[in-house]
Image: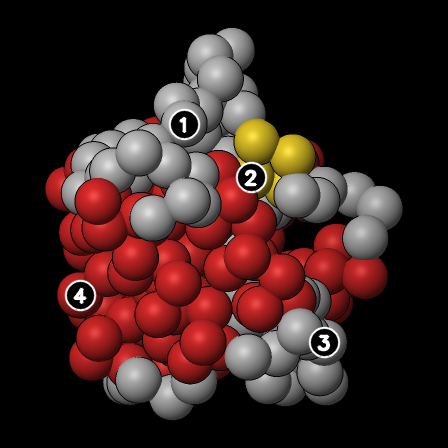
Amino acid sequence: VHRSGPVASLTAKSLNVGSQHGRADAIYLEGGQSELDGQLLFDLGSAGSAGDETLEELFAEAETAEEGGDHDGAAALYQRCLAIDPSDAIAAFNRANCLRAGGHAADAAHDYINAIKLDPAFVEAWFNLAGLMSEQGREASARRHLQKAIALDKNYADPVFNLARLEFDAGDLPEARRLWVRYLELDAESEWSRVAAKGVQFVDLQLARTAG
């Protein structure tokens, strides 16, 4: 979800489940479609804890609950998915998003970290964990996580924008400007590109006044 505000606030971007960003070879579920590196999800309906439901059906049920705004119910369903397959990074990530939306920040952070442990290259988990840290005022942690997301995917524009905003808030105007310029190289069309362009202009004016 993109939230825009006045340029003075330089509002950060946030990410929903199933963004188009991230690694092409990772496990992502968008629009109810499952992908697992070209492999079909195994039918675990015979597992005792799963009853007659397959893992895929349970995951779809969780997605439906999440899309309907039942974040607590969806989190519980994703937890059942993790009970069946504890190595499922995307279930941990989705559960974290639901917990975050439901106001359970500490539990959400735990699940983002779990997703990262399961898949250290899960760039969206790094990005969303950074957003959560920023919401809690933990700017140093947010900065580290955004830098990690950028290192994992240099063409992923969202963390570049948010890191620019962090540096701007911290008073490092040259670094904020550098990052906004980089963002504009990655995204020159969206509403966020207009915010970034205004950020560059603002910094240029401030630096010119300082130099004068």
Q: Which quadrant: the N terminus?
A: bottom right
The image's mark for residue 61 is: none
Report the amino acid beneath label 4: His
Gap between marks 2 and 3 measured at Cα: 26 Å
Is 68 above or below relative to 92?
Answer: below
Question: Could you give the CA–CA distance between mark 2 and mark 4, rounded to whole angstroms?
Answer: 21 Å
User: What amino acid does circle 3 point to?
Assistant: Ser
Q: What amino acid is found at the position of numbered circle 2 in the picture?
A: Leu
Residue 124 in sight in this render: no
> In terms of sequence position, does the residue under pointer 4 or pointer 3 come before the other?
3
- Name the spot of residue 167 as percent of width and height, x first: 39, 66
Quadrant of res 45:
top left
The quarter of the picture where residue 198 lies is: bottom right
**What kind of residue is marked 1?**
Asp
Whichever of callouts 1 and 2 sits on the residue coming sooner in the sequence is: 2
Give the residue drawn at x 67%, y 74%.
68
What residue would you read off at disc 1? 43
Label placed on residue 110: 4
